[in-house]
Structures are given as structure tokens and as C-alpha cells.
Image (cartoon, rainbow, N blue to C red):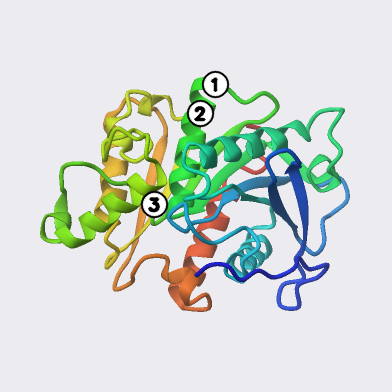
Amino acid sequence: MGTEIVPPSSSDPATGVQSKDIVISPETGVSARLYKPKTISPNKKLPLLVYFHGGAFFVQTAFSPTYQHFLNSLVKEANLIVVSVDYRRAPEHHLPIGYDDSWAAVKWAVSQSTVGGHEAWLKDHVDFDLMFFGGDSAGANIAHNMAIRVGSEGLDGGNLVGIVMMHPYFWGKDPIGSEETSMEVRAVIERFWLLTCPSSPGLDDPWLNPASDPKLSCLGCKRVLVFVAERDALRDRGWFYCEALGKSGWGGEVEIVEAQGEDHVFHLEIPNCEKGKDMVKKMASFVNQDKGHGL
């Protein structure tokens, strides 16, 4: 599963959005698909979203038709630039390689703001003071961990305003909420995590359970938007994340939106459903909230 790919488009028929592929690191093969709106006003600078795809750290790519459709829709609605990261995946490349690849992509994106930047779509059209991370499932996990890294290491040349996490892949050793009645699901998630990250100390690894991370209060942004789905086995972890973030001493704002009657990444499985369209509109509002306010 998750192996199908589609080429980038000079003009997507449905949205007019343009996309192209670039290699970030020839040494590791880390690459990305870039997206920009059909038209950009002269001298207009747009927000930047660095996006990390889902797939349990095992499957899918930045070149999947699933993400091509979703990000075309988002770019049209939100009028922003996207760097969709293709990080290396397990089992050939265990974590933390995927995290390190994603961080390399973040630093590459920000480096385009400098005099030496060569990627015109970013250098000419991005307002690097309006930078966001986003992702679904495992990609949402990456987005969070990249924001933790921004808070602990800094990010020269860019200002991370917020992160958007759709149905984030978080877990923990002690069951919470409906997890207490879903032991088979717990066993599968535990097995997958340990296959992905054999060096992990377990399910309370801060990479997987942010509530156990002493650096949680250092999350390197001021706004967080979390989407959860009522029937998703990861639902309670999304709510728990928001609660833990609020209690950590982090001084930002967190908002959570729950889709009733829906399952994990339903917005990707049924891309034209109304609730999926509502998610795209909410994301667009989130990333454009601070435009023109001189952050």
C-alpha cells in the first residue's frame, strides 16, 4: 500500500495549483514536492507550510496521488506555498532517520530566505515570518517533534508561527479513555512503533508520548491546531496532547476540532466529503490568521 505516485503538475486541472519536485540532499535522497498557487500578486509574500505525510512511518510518499489532491486543494483555499517532505521510511530506515530527514528539510526551506537561496518559489514568494508545520498521523507526529526541535535548537531565518496536526499518531504505556477496551489495537500500535524505532525505550518515548517529554513547554510556536475523529483509535491521544500542552507551561494557544462519526484520516480517504472540505477551510483560516499583523 501507499506506493502509487503521480508526477507534479504545471497546472492542476481542478485548482490551477503548480507543483514541482526538488532534491534536498543528494547524499541521502531526501526530496520534496513544492506547491504554489495559480497566480501570485507581484511582490506579494505568502505563508509557508512544511508538510509531512502520514503512513505510520512505513508507507506513502510526498508524491502520492492522495497528498497531491489534498495539498492542491489546500494551496488553492489557503493561498500559501507548501514544501511536502519525502523523508526516508522504516523498515529500511529506522527512526530517528525520518526525524533527521525532516529537520534537514526544514533547515533547507529556511535557508532559501538567505542571499544564497536558489529556489525561486520560496525565495521570491514566501514570508518566512509566517511559517507553519503540518501533517497527518505519523506526519503530525513529525510536525510536533520538529516544533520541539525549533524550540530547543532555534531556527535561523524563519519564524514558526504554528503547527497543524490531523489525527496525530501519539501513544503511551498507560491506556487512556477508550484505549482500555481496545487491547488488540494497543498491541498492534505497540508492535508497529517498536518496528519503526527499535532503539526506543518504549511507548512513553517522548517522540511518541509528548506528555512524557520534559521539553514540551519549549514547543517552538505560539499556535497549535489539532484535528481528531470520533471513531479513530488515536482520538483520545489528540485530546490528551492538548491537555498536556496546556498544563506544561507552554504559553501559546491550542485548539482542537473533532469530526463526529469519522475515522482516521477520513479526509484523505474520501477527499471530497464535506467534513474534509471543512478541515481544509479551517486550516486555511489558521495559517492566514496573522497575515498583515506584522509578526
Q: Is residue 293 visible?
A: no
Q: Tag 3: Cα neighbours inside 10 Å, few (<14), some, or many (≥20)?
A: many
Measured Cα–Cα span from mark 1 to mark 3: 23 Å
Amino acid residing under circle 3: Pro
Q: Tell whether 179 sits left or right of 98.
A: left
Q: Which mark is residue 80?
A: none
Image marks 1 and 3: residues in contact by CB distance under 8 Å? no
Residue 215, quarter of picture: top left
Q: Is residue 173 left or right of residue 295?
A: left
Is the residue 152 above or below the residue 191 in the image?
above
Tell me residue 40's x, y (percent).
82, 56
Q: Residue at x 47, y 59 (%)?
A: 55
Secondary-structure class at tag 3: loop
Residue at (70%, 27%) from the top-left corner? 157
Mark number, residue 153: 1
| Residue that carries the numbered disc 2 in the rendered image | 149
Residue at label 3? 168
Q: Quadrant of the C terminus?
A: top right
